[in-house]
Image (cartoon, rainbow, N blue to C red):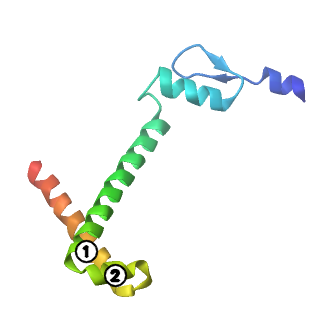
Amino acid sequence: MDAIVEDHKFKCLYCPRTFAKAQSLGGHTSKAHPGSSTVYSEKMKMRDAREEHRAIHNKAKNMLEKMDPELFQLGNKDHRYVKMLAIIKEDLFLEKSQKRVLRK
């Protein structure tokens, strides 16, 4: 069994280097060949999308706090808070998508 593990190598798709562990290959690929890995590129797109959603969520929370401080204090415990936050976020997403369309 150890012989199979020792012979098992992970080859870089972009250069001749090989690695004993998949994790090592992944680290090498992300540092030595940034942007080459489609998996890495997809991860970065997902991270950027999460950051955009997080920014909109935080903006919506700030808007709700200014609009209705008492409701804001109730937070997720109150269904009105959750619904109002969702409405504000939807408006912000629509606003952002309209700006994208206008830029094109």
Which amino acid type is marked by label 1?
A: Leu
Q: Which residue is mark 1?
A: 64
Does residue 82 appear in the picture of this structure? no
Q: Secondary structure at mark 1?
A: helix
Q: Secondary structure at mark 2?
A: helix
Q: Is mark 2 in CB contact (under 8 Å) with mark 1?
A: yes
Q: Nearer the viewer, residue 70 or 81?
A: 70
Q: Which residue is mark 2?
A: 81
Quadrant position of residue 75: bottom left
Tell me if 65 is positioned left or right of 37 in this view. Answer: left
Residue 52 placed where, x, y %? Answer: 31, 53
Tell me if 80 is positioned left or right of 17 in this view. Answer: left
Outermost residue toward the left? Answer: 102
Q: Residue at x 35, y 58 (%)?
A: 54
Outermost residue toward the right? Answer: 1
Quadrant where the N terminus is found in the figure: top right
Residue 30 placed where, x, y %? Answer: 50, 28
Q: Residue at x 26, y 73 (%)?
A: 65
Q: How many marks?
A: 2
Which label is found at residue 89? none
Which amino acid type is marked by label 2?
A: Tyr
Q: Residue at x 58, y 30 (%)?
A: 26
